[in-house]
Image: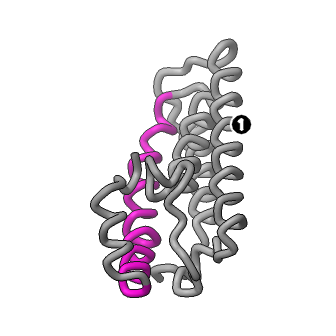
């Protein structure tokens, strides 16, 4: 199952699960202004960050396909990749946080740590193993210098 499901699918499943929790187990509601504005703003910032991270891959002329990290031709270690090894996945977490604010209940937020764990086990760790094999010492140095999430 590792590297078979694209991360955006995990994101969509998490968004749906958050919606279900809000509607069927709404713990501590806080709907409306200003939470919805803050939530949508966070989602917008996260999407912009994800597009920026994607642009770095395009500029480097290497694959951004998370299912095929073995097709990578070079490491991307500039821009947001100086602060997080996975800024696109971090953006997905911010999208979930924003969505939780838009939904306006505490219960949807329990999905976020589970999402991070699933993404780490099913996507990030396998990617790291492949990139270590592909880029050797250069990638191992990067692993020591930059954190996985933030």
Residue at image point 58% right, 73% down: 66
Q: Which residue is under mark 1?
A: 44
The magenta segment: 106-134
The quadrant of the image that shows the C terminus is top left
In-image side of 139 versus 74 (left or right): left
Q: In this view, does 130 lie above or below 45?
A: below
Q: Which colour scheme is used?
A: one colour
Quarter of the image where one finds residue 100? top right
- Disc 1 is placed on an element classified as helix
Residue 61 sits inside the magenta stretch: no
In-image side of 87 versus 84 (left or right): right
In percent of width and height, residue 53 lies at 63, 55
Quarter of the image where one finds residue 134? bottom left
Residue at image point 36% right, 80% down: 132
Residue at image point 46% right, 46% down: 112
In percent of width and height, residue 63 lies at 65, 76
Residue at image point 71% right, 67% down: 58
In-image side of 3 versus 132 (left or right): right
Q: How many labels does the image show?
A: 1
In percent of width and height, residue 10 lies at 57, 62
Q: How many residues crowd around disc 1 within 10 Å: few (fewer than 14), some, or many (20 or more)?
A: some
Majority SS type along the magenta span: helix
In percent of width and height, residue 123 lies at 46, 71
Of the pair 42 and 54, the residue shown nearer to us? 54
Q: In this view, does 76 lie above or below 81?
A: below
Residue 133 sits inside the magenta stretch: yes
């Amino acid at each position: 199952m590792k590297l078979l499901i694209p991360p955006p699918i995990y994101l969509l499943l998490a968004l749906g699960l958050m919606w279900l929790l809000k509607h069927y187990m709404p713990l501590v509601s806080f709907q409306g202004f200003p939470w919805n504005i803050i939530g949508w703003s966070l989602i917008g910032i996260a999407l912009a960050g994800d597009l920026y991270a994607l642009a770095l891959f395009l500029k480097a002329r290497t694959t951004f396909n998370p299912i095929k990290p073995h097709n990578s031709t070079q490491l991307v270690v500039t821009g947001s990749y100086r602060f997080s090894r996975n800024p696109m996945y971090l953006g997905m977490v911010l999208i979930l946080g924003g969505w939780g604010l838009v939904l306006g209940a505490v219960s949807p937020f329990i999905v976020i740590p589970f999402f991070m764990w699933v993404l780490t086990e099913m996507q990030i760790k396998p990617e790291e193993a492949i990139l270590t094999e592909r880029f050797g010492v250069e990638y191992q140095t990067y692993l020591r210098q930059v954190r996985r999430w933030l």
